Amino acid sequence: MEKNMDSTIKEVKGNTMDTSEEMSPLQAGSIDQLSLDEICALAEENARLRQELRIRDNDILSHDQVFDSIVSGTLHLILVMSVTTYKAEFITSNIDIALGISRSEAMEDVRNISHIFDNIEDYNRLEEIFIHRKNGARRLYLTYVIHLPYGRSDRVAVVLLCKSNIAKTDLEEMMIQQTQDINRAAGYFLASMSHDFRVPINSISGMVMLLMKNSNNPAKVMEYAHRIGVACHEILTTVDQILDMSRLETSEAELASEEFGLGLVLEEVSSITSSLAKARDQKFVFSAAGIEHDIVLGDRDRITEILRGILSNAVKYTPPGGRVELTVTGVPDENNENVSLIFEVRDTGIGMEREQMQKYFRDEIPENAESEPGRGTGIWLTRRLIEMMGGSISAQSLPGEGTIIWIRMRLKMVNSGGSEFWKQHGIKRMLVANNNLQEAARIRNLMESAGVNATSISSGYGTVKLIEQAAVAEDEYDLILLDEDLQDMDWHEVVNSVRRMSWIRMPHIFLMTSRHFYDEERRGAGIGQTLQKPFYVSGLHRLVEQVCEVSGNGSGDYEAGSDTMTGLRFLAAEDNTINADMLKDLLEMSGARCEIAGNGRAALAMFSNSRPGFYDAILMDLQMPVMDGYAAAAAIRALNREDAKSIPIIAMTGSTYEEDINRTYESGMNAHITKPLDIRVLQSHVRHLRDQ
């Protein structure tokens, strides 16, 4: 007991001396005169004071966490500093976000934050502008200076309350960051597009020189003209990519949902790719399975663009003598409501390293614009579009061995129109002549399921006999689908034999072929239209819609486009002389007549001064001097004459933006076609407008 008491007295003495630096010698020595109870009471008080000191120390050590939590998620700041040394004991950790200065630099000398800290005590409750070190944002702060009641007299706490619109300043920072990202992407994109423009333009320039040197050689002229057309197609593809990337980056891109024939898309894409491959001395192979009912719901233009882009790349990076393949496989679900599609594009091109392929198939645009311009942008765009459709894209590649790309997507199947469509167009009975018995049976079954009475046969001689027998029985065929490969007769002989039967009602004759026929060659052979292999219901649907009159009897052998333009007189408003001359020549070659107006006002005057019905249609460029196409169309519609309201006005535009297209309809135009002008598209619009 005595031993413990002695240690307590020693501890009290020591602590009393430690905590009482100003105690007088008398006071310090008087502790020996205290009673035991007084000493115990003093020891308890000492212990209590020590505990309070520990708690206060912990509070001081944790004040940074408390203050940080107070300003968390804001741009407000709290700091404790010396007004004599300008060093900070504490600064909330959000200073880097709020003002763009590191915490360590600010604590070393608070004047690094702003000059106002030279005389911070004078700024209590005053407003001051602080400038962000990194992005230059200007922020208004209200300062509060608090003199601390304990410790050194030069210590103050400074509270900076941000009075600027925080959402606005954050938006400024975000916009600055987005601008930097856009500038980086734009640098890559422009370098890539420059390459993609220069290559085909260089080809066109070279081909034009060769054309001039070989103008007396028809075969060479046709070859060079074909290659110029291929190069122009590449430029148009690049322009489409630019527009689509712009729409995707500004969130303006929307997917269409419309009925279309997948087979027609594949036919179009295959035809273009075949031309591209032929120009580079390559072999292109296309095959499809499982998509007989090919009328689907989706974005036709986007799917076409995706396939064209992938196949164009395959051709571009495959050397002469190489091979490019497109294989399409469809798997309908049990209820025939949806079809799962796999598009496989395989080439024997230069291939890619694994790291390179991963770079091209990642989400971001490559940062290095100079490494390989012209590669990666199209894949980036394709991937974004496929993801928007809910599909996926994957690839496999090895350097020097080529690349395989798989695209998977799911589309909703649509009824192809049923029997009513075929009846309306006079197709009740049909004969399918095909050397491949399995293919002939497949087509027959598809047409019978659509309500058409179909018969199939494999020989040319049998085809002629069946047509004769049907005529005798007065149950003629309305449509003959004739394959170019037959067992015993050439298809020319079959067509000629049928054409010599002058005593029968002549059926429509469509030739199924894998090669392209020019209109003159087709008409000379006596066939109405050609249907590209493989067979799709949508392909036949389109041809029947174009060729057969909607009368219910199917009589006559009307050919789409053959007389659409003949005898028509066009008024064309076009300010570009080269385009105007080309348009006039194209129309006159199609049997029409054309008069040119150099601007919108001239077109208005020419129409106003003509007699009613003199012009059959107006082709209106949109961007013209003096008066643009929108104003000219509106002015024509406002004229007080009988044909001003009814004459077809077709816009000719290089723009594919929806707002520009909508303006054409708002100004009174009936349709629009994109430049460069495709005479077949114009014929289709004219025929449609005349039938209305």
Image (cartoon, grey):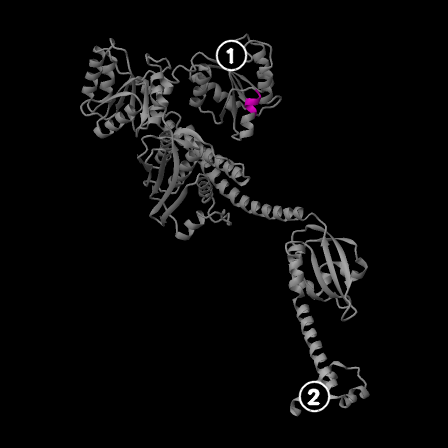
| Residue underneath mark 2 | 10
Q: Main secondary structure of the magenta part?
A: helix
Q: Which residue was labeled with disc 1?
A: 615
Q: Left or right: 596 with respect to 318? A: right
Label placed on residue 328: none
First to last magenta residue range: 663-667
Residue 501 rendering spot, x and y as whole percentages: 23, 11
Q: Quadrant of residue 557?
A: top left
Query: Of helix, strand and loop, which one carries label 2?
Result: helix
The secondary structure type at the circle numbered 1 is loop
**Identity of the residue drawn at 42% across and 30% down:** 229
The quadrant holding residue 204 is: top left
Q: Amino acid at mark 1?
A: Tyr
**Which quadrant of the structure image shows residue 57?**
bottom right
Q: Vertical placement of 208 versus 2: above or below?
A: above
In the rendered image, is residue 314 in sight?
A: yes
Q: Image check: 144 left or right of 206?
A: right
Where's residue 23, x and y in %?
Answer: 79, 83
Give the answer, above or below, for where 61 lies relative to 234.
below
Amino acid type assigned to the residue bearing label 2 in the image: Lys
Residue 366 point in image, percent of width and height: 49, 48
| Relative image position of residue 132 (x, y in whole percent) | 68, 53
Up-down relation of residue 613 to residue 649 (above or below): above
- Label 2 Cα crowd, 10 Å radius (few <14 / some 14-19 / many 20+): few
Q: Quadrant of the N terminus?
A: bottom right
Q: Nearer the viewer, residue 607 or 158?
A: 158
Left or right of 452 in this view: 653: right
